[in-house]
Image (cartoon, helix red, strand yellow):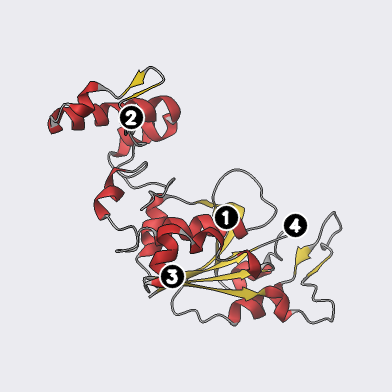
Amino acid sequence: MWRATILTLYPELFPGPLGASILGRGAAEGAWALDTVNIRDFSDNKYGSVDDTPAGGGAGLVMRADIMAAAIDSAPRNDRPVLCLSPRGAPLTQAKAHALSKGPGLIALCGRFEGLDERIFAARNIEEVSIGDFVLAGGEIAAMALIEACVRLIPGVLGSASSLGEESFEGGLLEYPQYTRPREFEGREIPDVLLSGDHKRIAEWRRKKAEEITRTRRPDLWERFLKDGPIRRGNNKEPER
């Protein structure tokens, strides 16, 4: 079973969205599991603090390496990677999510304050992962995004495997526009080609639109697509069932 273990100062935040919709159903059916470790349980003082002032001075507090190590060591590794959600990490991509989804799971370390004592990364072979070029108050929301990106790729969780291949970033392009009833909405109609029943024309239209959207909205992805061809990238949505 694919298992995610979250190391956090706020275990009450979980499962949160991970316990709802198709993800929650997948967990209930035994496709994956989630557990949390409260980092404060490993504090060495009566106040439950896990941080201290930064060496060399400066604002804020830094999470202590010894306490973080104890929390990490309490979680069975079972060949699972330890990932720290951090804006300085490598960007999370769809290729990374696919690779992680095929393994035994992951251990997600959620930092707070000014960050973690740098020594813990080498001491516990921790990989840093970023979900974007912005800063959050902590790693919990980023960990949820990482886990959702992985769990929805586990066979049987999403429900329809065919829908995975047509999403944004699958194949290197952003997704084509989607429509449904009513046929007309505030003067705007569903494109005729989508109602034609001509599957070849529909496929051609969707491909053209995917290329247009990628070229105009994400020129970086478009250039990469022209250079490398179809590839797997990041993820951005979950269809409801």
Q: Nearer the viewer, mark 4 or mark 3?
A: 3
Indicate which disc residue 105 carries.
3
Dot 1 alpha-carbon crowd within 10 angstroms: few under 14, some 14 to 19, many 20 or more: many
What separation in Å lies between label 3 and label 2 (alpha carbons)? 42 Å
Q: Amino acid at mark 1?
A: Ala
Q: Disc 4, disc 3: CB below 8 Å?
A: no
What separation in Å lies between label 2 and label 4 (alpha carbons)? 50 Å
Res 74 → quadrant: bottom right
Dot 3 alpha-carbon crowd within 10 angstroms: few under 14, some 14 to 19, many 20 or more: many
What separation in Å lies between label 4 and label 3 (alpha carbons)? 27 Å
**202 relative to 135 in the view: left or right:** left
Indicate which disc residue 114 carries.
4
Res 105 → quadrant: bottom left
Q: Which residue is mark 2?
A: 182
Which sits earlier in the primary sequence, circle 4 or circle 1? 4
Which sits earlier in the primary sequence, circle 3 or circle 2? 3
